Image (cartoon, rainbow, N blue to C red):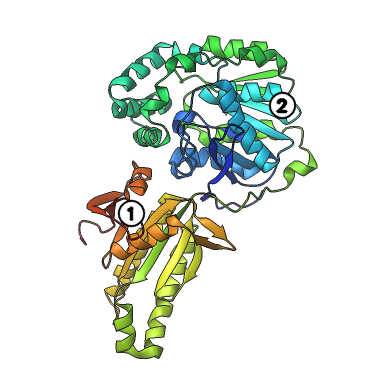
Amino acid sequence: MRAHNHRMETEVRYCTTKDGVRIAYTVSGSGPPLVFLEEPMSSHAQLNWANPFLRRYFGEMARHNTFVKFDQRGTGLSDRAFEPALDGFVRDLEAVVDRLQLTSFGLNGTQNSTPTAIAYAARHPERVRRLAITNGFARTSDVMDTPASKAWLSAAAVDWEMATEAMGSLVFGPGREESRVWGALIRASVTPDYFADLEAFSRIDASRFLEQLTMPVLVLRHTGIRYITDDMTRELASRIPDARLVTVEGLWADDPEGIGRRIADFINEGGAPETAAVPLTPPPSGVRTVLFTDIVGHTEMMQRLGDARGRDVLREHERLVRSSIEQHGGTEIKTDGDSFMVSFGSVAAATACAIELQRAFAARNATAAEPLRLRMGLNAGEPIDEKGDLFGATVILASRIAAQAGAGEILVPDTIRGLLSGKGFVFGDRGEFVPKGFDDAVRLYEVRWQSEESA
């Protein structure tokens, strides 16, 4: 078996549907392609990989397959404006598959994405070689009519934050670590507006396609999921010509690697076409987190130490920075000796790298004859990638933010603070500023990295 790091800090890339919707997607791992349709409420192409449970779940599938996942319209990093309709959701999947030029692949639909998976598989049987359905159903109205779903939708209409926190307990069980962070992931993935048209959601129905499925289908259900009933699962499996029903005791969090492995084993059963095993290389674009670091007082230091001694200090600086970049899966874009520009596929990894760097230099400065104090700024967006260099507003704003930081500080905009919600980072509000060359003010937050003892 191949050795895998499984940081899975994958780049977020974009494609456009036939009706003009921008869809964010990621590609990880290698092997036979497996396209995963995420539960929309927890679909966020960047934050999913930073979630401890999903990291284990997705990582197991990416261990065996080229693992493709995306944010459907209205969720995550894809366009948020949408009308709930099965055809629209199918177009999202078509756009990703067509962009990657997948001719034969396994498909996995999960919970509310199941109708999309069923409809696509029935319409494109020549492409979907195997279909796995996890805690799924054919009609959205079925799950919306369960007592658990009715109670949750009523709560969401009154108190969105409370309802999202409660969903963690429904999915994972009360008191679980996964339950604690799940609410923040939902709030980052969708807004209350996602559920504004419940009547349209209730009309989503793929049941007419069940008998048309010609490929082998795995129907997998967790017994502890209260909003998926036995009747829903039995009807789903009984109407599919070549279905295999598997019931798993407990909840999602009980064995994420085991479920991921079971899905991958089913998808890969019977082998795959030779062309499917070729690793996919998507176009060089996508959402990145850009980190700028800079030594405060570099010019004065060089004047004081002279070129030779100053260069020795800079070499130590470069060694520490590059070591942390490598550990956190970053890509060095450029350096001037006293400053670095670094790109990450994950905002959490970029922020963790910045914190580790500040702590590393603080530890060094405690005994060093020549202290080095860094200021840092981050921003996330979709920069222009030209031959390994990054350009555009995302990069410029990251640089402007870094220039606002003082020695030992890490500054981020409000967008990054929102993406890191629920991940254990601590922030301090630094107010607004209007970056040079930009029309609108940006609210900044300082990332706190010092412990109470050292603060």
Question: Is the C terminus in the top left, top right, bottom left or bottom right quadrant?
Answer: bottom left
Please tell me whether mark 1 sits on a helix, a strand or a loop. strand
Is 118 drawn above or below residue 69 in the view shown?
Answer: above
Observer able to see residue 199: yes
Is 98 drawn above or below residue 328 in the view shown?
Answer: above
Q: Residue at x 76, y 37 (%)?
A: 272
**x and y percent of residue 160 in the render?**
31, 27
Question: 23 or 183: which is nearer to us?
Answer: 23
**x and y percent of residue 290 in the render?**
44, 58
Q: CA distance from mark 1 to mark 2?
A: 44 Å
Q: Residue at x 57, y 38 (%)?
A: 69
Residue identified by numbered label 2: 124
Kindly indicate the quadrant of the structure image that contains residue 89: top right
Q: Is residue 369 left or right of residue 343?
A: left
Kindly indicate the quadrant of the structure image that contains residue 269: top right
**x and y percent of residue 394 in the render?**
43, 55
Q: Amino acid at mark 2?
A: His
